[in-house]
Image (cartoon, rainbow, N blue to C red):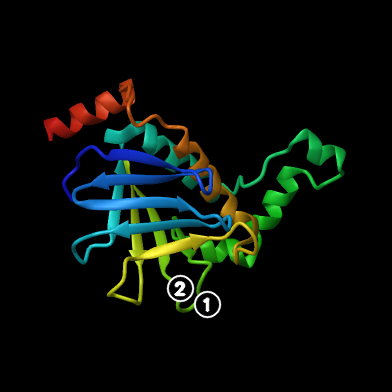
Amino acid sequence: MENEEIKFTKTYCSHTQTYDLEFDKNGKILRFIFGGNGDLCIDLFSDGEDNSFEITKENNEIYKLFDKMFNSISNCQIVEDFDFDIEMGFNPADETNKEIKNSQIYKELFFKNSINYHSDNYVYEEATILKIEQSQDKYILNFISKEKDIMPFIEVTNSGSRYGLLHIPFMYLYNDLCKIDPDYHQIDIEEYAYVKKMKLR
């Protein structure tokens, strides 16, 4: 896939008071939509059979947020300690994260150095899978669906996710992406170095 900069847009939805996010690259559109029911839908519009989408350092602000999300799952740093939690006597974050890492659902979500999220809105065996892999200077998102004639998508459920607390990094990712200003892109040194390296290739 040829690298090129992502066109990022966000649209405010007054009925849900949330943003619809779109990432347009190479004729494909990756969307994040937060529904009124509290569920996050991630889908991909593609005019071909390739249901993958790449996040590269050419879009370093976006790349860093996917990197943060991926590392929080790979390192199993899912929850943090907050003063309120401590006052209420909840388990320390380190203890909770350790329990999550030893759980079967963590092993089903993260294996072979990739995230494999089965959509919450279908039974496990029939659900579309969002597979996120880390490669050199990029993240590859691949939608694996048994239904070939519809737009591939997954739902991440806030209440009753099959992955328990492991849905949280996806919600953090969405919230962080919403903070990006599409009309103001300031290139940083890391992004500049990456673009220069790609041109030299």
Secondary structure of the residue carrying numbered label 1: loop
Q: Gap in Å between the C-alphas at discs 2 and 1?
A: 6 Å
Residue 43, quarter of picture = bottom left
Q: In this view, does 175 lie above or below 33?
A: above
Q: What residue type is labelled 2?
A: Ala
Q: Name the residue under label 2.
A: 127
Q: Residue 161 appears at what percent x and percent y?
A: 60, 63
Q: Residue 1 appears at what percent x and percent y?
A: 18, 51
Which circle marks residue 93 in the picture? none
Question: What residue do we see at 29% from left, 28% from top?
Answer: 191
Q: In this view, does 188 lie above or below 53?
A: above
Q: What residue type is labelled 1?
A: Val
Q: Label 1 near label 2: C-beta < 8 Å?
A: yes
Bin the neighbour count of mark 2 within 10 Å (Cα to Cα): few under 14, some 14-19, many 20 and up: many
Bin the neighbour count of mark 1 within 10 Å (Cα to Cα): few under 14, some 14-19, many 20 and up: few
Q: Mark 1 points at which residue?
A: 123
Q: Residue 7 appears at what percent x and percent y?
A: 26, 39
